[in-house]
Every structure is written in structure tokens, then in C-alpha cells.
Image: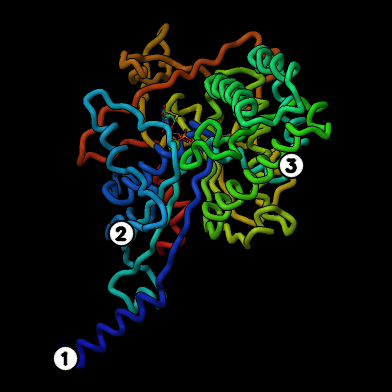
């Protein structure tokens, strides 16, 4: 290498190191909110979908400064996000959604672009930004609030929840079993038997639309913890948990170990050093499920946002210093409604978050709310009805039956119980639209999402 080449090479190397920039993006949401679909789409848009026609509101692409995105080498500390498998589900002749997540995984991306101004533009032929994203089962998110409660408080919290109208009937057999429980018995088999009954109840709740708060999450989705003794865990009745007995002592010990050895490391590992966060909320399924579901969704969001409260006394800042500068709240599956309803969906999301956000420190970060579909399942249009153009969507049900219909209005405010009594919301789940590579993966507003979370870093 000549001296000149050497100097040029060193300068290239130096400026790359000097400008080495990294973004760690947190994609957060309850089970089924759309995290896996979102990450799949986001990565695909950044690696294959970078045409101005596909991402018109993503400045770096529209200005033709985006040079492409590549998957980074696999990091050894976590399984790789199954991007290719997820795409295979979508590429089938009858496309399907990727399955629900059962463990955490990670994916890194290297984005190349031409900077517009400043030192970076002058010194480098191109600039790079690396992006790191982690996926995890949504059930685990709801474990975070357990760290702020004692075992006894968790029992009180759980039984208040199980006594609610939409949950009480299912809880009856387990309630009965606890009422007859022998609190002096902390034998392995006995504790496992009661845990199995609780697990069955949790599974029923998990399948009940609108029952979001199912704890502990690892009882439903154990990941590598399957069979661990601390997963022998269930909430005794509050009056039982207040007693000093062998069973209470054992469950308290398991609860404390679970908080210390499972939740805390997960929290650190996943949420430490996040720079930006996307919080996905499926408001439409909650509307389908009725009033109690919307209230429980609001409660679940409050608990989650409390865990992320960025104030000085928050759990998050006691564990580490968060640097989250941007938070996007996204109402997912907007493609289950007609486009003119998206504004209402965004307002509904904002209303759902209003109370939870009131006392949080999210104000310290830049936030935005929008209605999106990471992977589109419908086309929108109009049908003539009594001489009037009526908006509609068309797609296929999960059983692959073609449908064209108007899914109804989205309320801009959380409806009252009276309204729910008169009106059944029916935003039916649809299969992904047929799609073939190299066509862009159809979406709604993923370009707005990319602009909000990455736009300022790609100037
Ligand atoms: N119409 C539509 N449906 C979606 C979209 N994203 C997700 N869904 C639906 O929501 C379901 C759950 O999406 P996932 O991405 O698996 O949700 P998740 O948050 O990863 O769920 P867990 O892995 O269980 O925590 C999918 O199976 C789809 O039925 C979207 O953009 N549009
Ligand atoms: Mg998932």
C-alpha cells in the first residue's frame, strides 16, 4: 500500500470510528400487540424496501441518500431473531402470521447512507449507523411490576383482578382449591399440584380476549426456565398470604427468587442502554372484547409505563441510567379499519395513555403517537351504497375467506359501559396480504415510524 493510500485508509478508519454510532431500539408491547410482525417489517423495509415509492416519508430514502442496510454478524449472547423464517410464513401462497414468540432473540443491522452536511459529510464517502433490536415474549413484560410488590401484595393484586366480572367465573375452581388448601404443607408435590392448577387458570385467561394481566409470565412462557423450582408459584388468597405458615414461606421465597434471578436480569439485559423505544398497543382487540378489556388494557399500560418511569426514583433509573430520547406509541393493526378511521384510532390510543402517562417522566423524551400496520392485511377502497361512496376494506380472514366490508367507526374516546352494552365492535383479524419478493412488504406508515425513530440519526 502506498503512503497516500495508507493515509487515506487510516483517515477512513479513523472517521468511521469517530462517527461510529449505535442505536438500541426497544420494541415493547403486551402479548399479541404485534412486536414480532413489527420487527420483521422494520428490518425488511430497511434491508429490501428502500424505494421512495415504498417509504415516501422516510427522508433518507426519499432524498436518495440511503445506501442500504445489512444484517450484522450474529452476536453470541442471544439467539438470532428468526427473520427468514418469519418471511417464509408471509411468502406462502396462503400467507400466515409468524407464530407467537417463546424466547428472546436479537438482530443487529448496519445502515449505510450519505450524510447531508457537517463534518461527517465532508470526511466520509458514506456514514454508518448500527441498529440493535431485541424481541421477547410479551408475557414477560408484565413481570416487571412484580419487582415493586411483595408476595403478599401480589396476592392482593391478583385476587382483586380475578374477582372482576370478566374473570370471576374462570377463577372459581382454583378459588375453591385454595379455600381447601393445607397451608402447613409445603411438600414438593403439593406445591406443584397447586401451581399446575394456577397455570391452567393463567392459560385460560391468556386465551380470554381482553385479559392482559397474566403473571408470572414465565409460568405461561417459561423459555429456558422450564422446570425451575421458583416457577412453583401462585397467588394464595390474601388472608392466607398474611399468615405465617410453611406454604406461605415457600411461596414467598420462590417469589423473591423469581424477582431477583429472573425479572431483574431480564430487565437489565433487555432495557439497559435503550436509546429509543416503540410501544405497541392493540386497541382494536380491546374494543372487540368489551368494556372490562379496555379498562384492563389501560391498567396494564399504566403498570408497564410505571416500570419505565424515567424519574429519578424510578426502578429503571435505580438499576441503570436510561438514555431514552424518543418514544413512539403506535396503535397497531390499523389495517383492520378504513383509512379515515386512523385519526380516531390515534386519538383513542392517546386517551388510553393519558392517565398512565400523567405521572410519568415520558415528558423528558420526545414522543409521538400514530396508527400503523407493520404488515398490511387489507386494501382499502369504496363501495357504492344507496348512491353513496362508502369506505371499505378487503382482505382474507385467518381461514382465508375473502371479505369486503366496512368494519365500523373507531371511537375517539374510550366508550362507556352503556355504549358497549348497545354496540359490539367487530374489527376482525385478517391474514397478511399475498406478497412476493422482491416486491416491497406492504405496510401502513412504517415510513413515518422509521423517520421518527431514525430520521435524525441519518442526516
Ligand atoms: N392486520 C394486522 N395484524 C397484525 C399486524 N401485526 C400483528 N398482527 C396480528 O397480531 C398477531 C400477533 O402479532 P405478533 O407480532 O406475533 O405479536 P407479538 O407482540 O410478537 O406477540 P408475542 O410474541 O405473543 O408477545 C399476529 O398473529 C397477527 O394476527 C399488522 O400489522 N396488521
Ligand atoms: Mg412475538
Q: Which mark is residue 149?
A: 3
Q: Is residue 210 visible?
A: no
Indicate the position of residue 306 as horizontal and vertical percent values: 69, 45
Left-right relation of 98 to 184 = left
Q: Residue at x 63, y 61 (%)?
A: 320
Contact flag, marks 3 and 1 (Cβ < 8 Å): no
Q: Earlier in the sequence, mark 3 or mark 1?
A: 1
How many numbered tags mark residues here?
3
Indicate the position of residue 83 as horizontal and vertical percent values: 32, 43
- Depicted 308 relative to depicted 372: above or below: below
Q: Residue at x 37, y 35 (%)?
A: 375
Q: CA distance from mark 1 to mark 2?
A: 31 Å
Indicate the position of residue 19 as horizontal and vertical percent values: 41, 74
Q: Which quarter of the frame holds ligand 2?
A: top left
**Residue highlighted by disc 2:** 73
Indicate the position of residue 257 as horizontal and vertical percent values: 64, 46
**In the foreground, 71 or 421:** 71
**In the foreground, 408 or 144:** 144
Res 167 → quadrant = top right
Q: Is residue 228 visible?
A: yes
Q: CA distance from mark 2 to mark 3?
A: 40 Å
Mark 3 vs mark 1: in front: 3
Mark 3, ligand 1, within 8 Å: the answer is: no
Q: Earlier in the sequence, mark 1 or mark 2?
A: 1
Res 442 → quadrant = top left
Q: Secondary structure at mark 1?
A: loop
**Residue highlighted by disc 1:** 2
Amino acid at each position: 500500500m502506498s503512503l497516500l493510500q495508507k493515509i487515506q485508509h487510516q483517515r477512513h478508519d479513523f472517521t468511521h470510528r469517530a462517527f461510529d454510532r449505535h442505536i438500541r431500539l426497544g420494541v415493547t408491547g403486551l402479548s399479541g400487540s404485534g412486536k414480532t410482525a413489527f420487527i420483521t417489517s422494520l428490518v425488511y423495509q430497511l434491508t429490501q424496501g428502500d424505494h421512495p415509492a415504498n417509504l415516501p416519508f422516510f427522508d433518507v430514502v426519499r432524498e436518495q441518500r440511503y445506501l442500504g442496510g445489512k444484517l450484522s454478524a450474529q452476536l453470541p449472547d442471544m439467539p438470532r431473531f428468526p427473520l427468514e423464517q418469519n418471511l417464509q410464513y408471509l411468502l406462502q401462497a396462503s400467507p400466515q402470521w409468524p407464530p407467537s414468540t417463546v424466547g428472546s432473540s436479537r438482530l443487529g443491522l448496519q445502515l449505510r447512507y450519505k450524510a447531508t452536511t457537517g463534518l461527517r459529510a465532508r470526511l466520509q464517502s458514506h456514514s454508518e449507523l448500527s441498529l440493535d433490536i431485541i424481541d421477547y415474549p410479551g408475557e414477560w413484560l408484565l413481570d416487571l411490576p412484580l419487582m415493586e410488590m411483595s408476595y403478599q401484595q401480589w396476592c392482593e393484586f391478583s385476587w382483586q383482578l380475578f374477582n372482576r366480572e370478566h374473570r370471576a367465573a374462570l377463577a372459581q375452581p382454583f378459588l375453591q382449591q385454595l379455600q381447601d388448601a393445607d397451608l402447613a404443607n409445603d411438600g414438593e408435590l403439593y406445591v406443584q399440584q397447586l401451581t399446575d392448577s394456577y397455570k391452567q387458570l393463567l392459560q385460560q385467561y391468556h386465551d380470554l380476549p381482553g385479559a392482559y394481566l397474566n403473571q408470572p409470565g414465565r409460568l405461561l412462557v417459561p423459555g429456558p426456565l422450564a422446570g425451575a423450582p421458583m416457577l412453583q408459584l401462585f397467588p394464595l388468597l390474601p388472608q392466607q398470604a398474611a399468615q405465617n405458615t410453611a406454604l406461605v414461606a415457600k411461596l414467598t421465597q420462590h417469589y423473591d427468587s423469581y424477582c431477583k434471578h429472573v425479572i431483574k436480569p431480564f430487565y437489565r439485559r433487555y432495557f439497559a442502554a435503550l436509546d429509543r423505544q416503540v410501544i405497541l398497543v392493540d386497541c382494536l382487540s380491546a374494543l372487540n372484547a368489551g368494556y372490562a378489556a379496555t379498562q384492563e388494557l389501560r391498567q396494564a399500560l399504566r403498570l408497564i409505563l410505571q416500570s419505565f418511569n424515567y424519574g429519578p426514583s424510578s426502578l429503571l433509573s435505580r438499576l441503570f441510567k436510561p438514555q431514552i430520547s424518543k418514544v413512539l406509541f403506535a396503535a397497531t393493526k390499523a389495517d383492520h379499519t378504513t383509512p379515515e378511521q386512523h385519526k380516531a384510532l390515534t386519538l383513542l390510543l392517546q386517551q388510553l395513555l393519558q392517565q398512565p402517562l400523567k405521572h410519568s417522566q415520558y415528558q423528558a423524551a420526545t414522543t409521538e403517537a400514530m396508527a400503523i400496520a407493520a404488515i398490511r392485511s387489507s386494501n382499502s377502497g369504496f363501495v357504492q351504497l344507496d348512491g353513496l361512496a362508502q369506505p371499505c376494506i378487503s382482505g382474507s380472514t385467518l381461514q382465508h375467506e375473502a371479505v369486503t366490508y366496512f368494519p365500523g367507526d373507531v371511537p375517539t374516546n374510550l366508550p362507556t359501559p352503556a355504549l358497549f352494552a348497545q354496540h359490539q365492535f367487530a374489527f376482525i383479524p385478517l391474514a397478511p396480504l399475498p406478497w412476493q419478493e422482491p416486491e416491497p412488504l406492504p405496510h401502513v406508515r412504517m415510513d413515518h415510524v422509521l423517520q421518527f425513530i431514525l430520521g435524525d440519526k441519518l442526516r
